[in-house]
Amino acid sequence: MASSPRRTVILDTSAFVAGFDPFSIGEEQYTVPLVKEELDKTSALRAKLELAEESGKVKIKTPQEPFLNEAKASAKTVGDTFFLSATDHQVLALALELRNGGCSPLIATDDYSIQNVAKQLGIEFAPLITFGIRRRLQWIRYCPACHERYPADYGSRTCRVCGTELKRKPLKNQPP
């Protein structure tokens, strides 16, 4: 009988901000170096992560470049490129790398863009203090002042017509 892939949990910064306790679960846990950098050096959240790291409860790992490229390509496909930080890309890439290594990754995050790209990649996620997304979202960017519309991967943060900062919203009638 073949065993099922071992469950691993990848922790995003929002997991720590939401109060997630790495000592509360038995699964193997990972995060990326940039998550540690995002937590203030003097905060209790950073201390919790460092304690979990020192005890071996959380492993900090930098994902390999091919997985980072795959995560970025997927983010571009669903239109989340401009809304993901370098940290977010690394979290997604680490989940891909762990899946490629035979694990069953689950990303603990309240970040909707991470959830959206994870859904696109077929990676499970668990929101902590939000409801999370129910279906994959395809975004469109728009100008709230003149209502000009742009594709999600439009190369500027401002409207070419009036110069107002662009916002985003999901396209309607999207596939699940």
Image (cartoon, grey):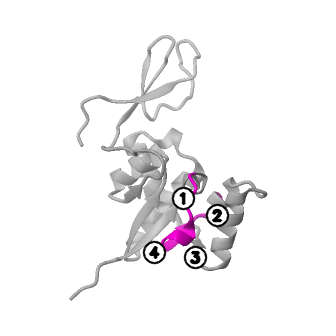
Choose the circle earlier in sequence order: 3 or 1.
3
SS for dot 1: helix
Mark 4 burial class by Cα count in 10 Å: few <14, some 14-19, many 20+: some
Q: Nearer the viewer, residue 118 or 72?
A: 118
Choose the circle earlier in sequence order: 4 or 1.
4
Disc 3: which residue: 57
> Which residue lies most toward the left here?
1
Q: Mark 2 and 1 residues: CB-CB less than 8 Å, in contact?
A: yes
Q: Mark 3 and 1 residues: CB-CB less than 8 Å, in contact?
A: no
Q: Looking at the picture, how far across and down is residue 39, in whole percent?
A: 69, 55
Q: What's the distance in space between the residues labelled 4 and 1, CA to CA?
A: 20 Å
The answer to whether residue 69 is magenta is no
Quadrant placement of the C terminus: top left
| Badge nearest the viewer, 2 or 4 | 4
Q: Viewed as shown, does residue 23 lie left or right of 130? A: right
Q: Amino acid at mark 4?
A: Glu
Q: Which mark is residue 33?
A: 2
Vertical placement of 146 versus 38: above or below? above
> Which residue lies most toward the right here?
42
Q: Nearer the viewer, residue 164 or 38?
A: 38
Q: What's the distance in space between the residues labelled 3 and 1, CA to CA?
A: 20 Å
Q: Which mark is residue 90?
A: 1
SS for dot 2: helix
Residue at x 45%, y 41% (from the top left corner)? 80
Residue range in magenta is: 18-34
| Badge nearest the viewer, 3 or 1 | 3
Q: Looking at the picture, how far across and down is residue 84, in whole percent?
A: 53, 45
Residue at x 56%, y 52% (from the top left corner)? 18
Q: Which mark is residue 27?
A: 4
Q: Nearer the viewer, residue 172 or 78?
A: 172
Q: What's the distance in space between the residues labelled 2 and 4, CA to CA?
A: 20 Å
